[in-house]
Every structure is written in structure tokens, then in C-alpha cells.
Image (cartoon, grey):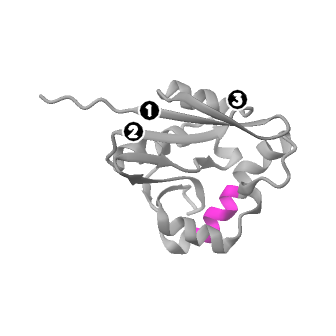
Amino acid sequence: MIIELATIQDVPALLDLQRKAFAPLCEELEWKDAPVLTESLEHAYEEFARCTTLKVQNDEGLIIGSVNGNVTDGSLYIGRLMVLPEYQQQGFGKLLFREIQSRLPHRHAWLCTCQQVRHPYEFYLREGFKPYKSEEVGPGLTWAYLEKSICLFNT
């Protein structure tokens, strides 16, 4: 699989991927009005303009996974990492997650995730991220804010 930059023409497909990737999780949490499910196409275009977005496609050209991020003042803010449910647990998310970090130079990386969705939360911990703050966003829903510092050595 080749990871490549998404283009503005990919935005509608990325929004569709987002809804399909997050719908099962939101249903499990009974979070019907989650931003990942209710985001408008207009907002998706605005977000795309602010971020670097990577994608991976299957052999038929369907976008099966994506991640976005942007760097400000040496800090990488990682946005939505998403993979179609039928392609999850096959390493695509890990490849995308590591690729966005390697393509965008940074000293710190930041992200947030729903703490009640255990698999992604535990994945981020295994990838070296540590929680630094949490915030209740609804009944039984907590955003966990995670960070990771990059050590730079002079050789």
C-alpha cells in the first residue's frame, strides 16, 4: 500500500470515510450527535485547507484510511486517524499514524481521543503518547488529551 497526500478532490470521499469509520464507535457510545458524524462538507473543506492529509487506497482506488495533522511552533497536532471498519486491525492505521509523524517535522506531538474507546486509546499509549489532561464532553464520555515529546540528539 502506498501512502500519499490527499487532494482537495478527495474531501467528499474523506468525509464519507470518516462517517463510516467512526459510526460503529459512536453507536457503541450512544453518541448520535458526535462531530465526526455531523460535520458538513463545507467544514470538511475548511479543515482540509488547514491540514496535511494523508490517505491510503485499496487496489480499486477506494480511500480506506486517512490521517491529518498540522505543525505550529514545532508542535504536531494530529487530527483524525481513520480506517474503514473492514480494513481495521491490518496495520493501516499504524502506518498512517507513523507516516504523518515522519513527514511533518516537530518537537512535540499532540492529539485527543475518546477515552472510552479503548482500542485507539491504548494504541496511542503504545505509540509513546502520554495523557496530560482529560475533559468530560458528555455523560460517560471523556476526551483524553495526549502528548509525546521527541528527543533530538546532536551527533
Q: Give, as a single range, the part of the protein colored magenta.
A: 11-18
Q: SS for tag 2?
A: strand
Residue at left offset 50%, top offset 56%: 55
Q: Determine contact: label 2, label 3, CB under 8 Å.
A: no
Q: Secondary structure under badge 1? A: strand
Is the residue marked by circle 3 packed among few (<14), some (14-19), or many (20+) residues within 10 Å?
few
Label 1: which residue?
Answer: 148
* Residue under pointer 3: 118
Q: Position of residue 131 (x, y in %)?
A: 56, 28
Q: CA distance from mark 1 to mark 2?
A: 6 Å
In this rendering, does residue 68 appear at all?
Answer: yes
Q: Nearer the viewer, mark 2 or mark 3?
A: 2
Q: CA distance from mark 3 to mark 1?
A: 19 Å
Could you tell me the amino acid type at mark 3?
Arg
Residue at image point 39% right, 52% down: 71
* Residues tagged 1 and 2 counted as in contact (Cβ below 8 A): yes
Give the quadrant of the C terminus: top left
Residue bearing mark 2: 108
Residue 60 in percent (x, y) is at 58, 62
77 to 59, vertically: above or below: above
Nearest to N terminus: mark 2 or mark 3: 2
In this image, 76 relative to 23: left or right? left
